[in-house]
Image (cartoon, coloured by chain):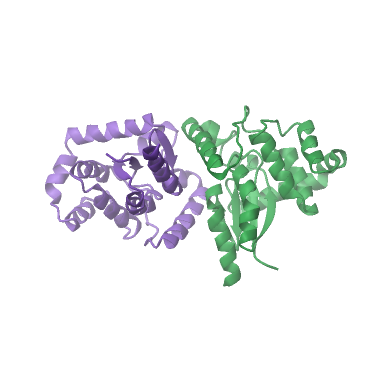
Chain colours: A green, B purple
């Protein structure tokens, strides 16, 4: 068992999009395995007194974020289109991602959901959009929607969000390696480096 | 006249410390000149409804920031000790920095103030601390304190903070090159790259 890096992300989170696109090749090159950990930011933001994204609450910060994201996607060669609605509700997508994580196709699913939101400008809360994403991966939507609505998966997502809080997570994307927390797409490389050095130690 | 990069910073700002330490060698290697622009975050935070640092208002974020700063200073080979008080008042230091910027010794002064705060754990609002910093640069404190208290410099700092807001600045450190805003110590390299490419264009 080699070193692992927990990747904590939320489908509404803008900077989680480039992180989800970049993490697997970078981790693989370092001999680090990625553990996909979808969670919800809403309950965490609510505890900080926010009922909306801080990028909407603080307009100067929001305006900067969109431009920064556009620049960094261009630099990374990632397609990007500013969505016409923000933030979009990633609840159902997160529940499906939990199932996908158990079954080993969470990376492909998550990247496809991010592209739907931040490239194709689609509403990822819409079951038709999620259905098309699931079909594009060669899977059947109906049984997944049924599982995603069952209490077991709902509880699991709640527990996952609680686990995020217990790790000190307050935003997304976040990375955890050996108890060390890293926050932000720009901390992906140091987080992988940290995971790699744990193995060497 | 080669390309320039505006460096907007505040003496209480934690991530401005590594940015101030790193900017000149990196910019020089890229053929970019640095324009030191001290300003105050207090009035900007007040407009966002904050009367304290967001790192104090949001404890999970604050706890993360101190650890992240410690790790990144270690990686950069920069000394760091978490100050016993945060944030410290950088008002007088910012006024002196404005004078130093006119006279061409702002980089040395600013780095020394950051070391006093984030390495020696000294109160940078204390004139004895600032006096020792100024003397360490071979200058006389008394005439500088007098100029720093004069209306011309007080007004200039107010205007500088207004100029920061007019550029869309909402935090520190920030960098501006050719009208493009970059926020955060981790955006120093892309900001320098942007300034460099403007020259090439």
Q: Quick check: B43 above or below A111? A: above
Residue at the far front: name it: B200
Whether residue A99 is visible to the viewer of this picture, yes or no, is yes
Residue A173 x, y percent position in the rendering: 60, 47
* Residue nearest the viewer, comparing A190 with B70: A190
* Residue nearest the viewer, comparing A119 with B133: A119
Residue A139 x, y percent position in the rendering: 84, 43
Residue at the far top: name it: A84
Whether residue B170 is visible to the viewer of this picture, yes or no, is no
Report the quarter where the N terminus of chain B lies. top left
Residue B201 x, y percent position in the rendering: 40, 36
Residue A179 occupies quadrant: bottom right
Residue B76 occupies quadrant: bottom left
Q: How many labels does the image show?
A: 0
Q: Which residue is drawn at 35% across and 52% down?
A: B29
Left or right: residue A201 versus residue B6 is: right
Q: Residue at x 61, y 38 (%)?
A: A79
Residue B50 occupies quadrant: top left
Q: Quick check: A195 above or below A14? A: below
Residue at the far bottom: name it: A201
Q: Quick check: A47 above or below A125? A: below
Residue A199 x, y percent position in the rendering: 61, 69
């Amino acid at each position: 068992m080699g070193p692992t890096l927990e990747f904590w992300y939320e489908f509404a989170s803008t900077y989680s999009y480039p992180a989800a696109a970049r993490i697997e090749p970078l981790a693989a090159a370092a001999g680090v395995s990625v553990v996909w950990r979808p969670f919800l930011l809403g309950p965490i933001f609510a505890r900080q007194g926010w009922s909306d994204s801080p990028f909407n609450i603080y307009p100067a910060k929001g305006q900067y974020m969109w431009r920064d994201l556009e620049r960094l996607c261009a630099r990374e060669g990632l397609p990007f289109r500013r969505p016409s609605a923000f933030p979009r509700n990633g609840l159902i997508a997160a529940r499906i991602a939990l199932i996908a994580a158990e079954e080993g196709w969470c990376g492909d699913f998550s990247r496809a959901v991010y592209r739907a939101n931040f490239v194709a400008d689609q509403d990822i809360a819409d079951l038709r959009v999620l259905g098309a994403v699931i079909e594009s991966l060669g899977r059947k939507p109906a049984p997944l929607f049924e599982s995603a609505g069952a209490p077991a998966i709902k509880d699991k997502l709640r527990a996952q969000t609680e686990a995020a809080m217990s790790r000190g997570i307050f935003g997304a994307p976040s990375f955890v390696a050996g108890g060390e927390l890293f926050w932000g797409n720009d901390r992906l490389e140091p987080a992988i480096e940290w995971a790699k050095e744990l193995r060497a130690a």
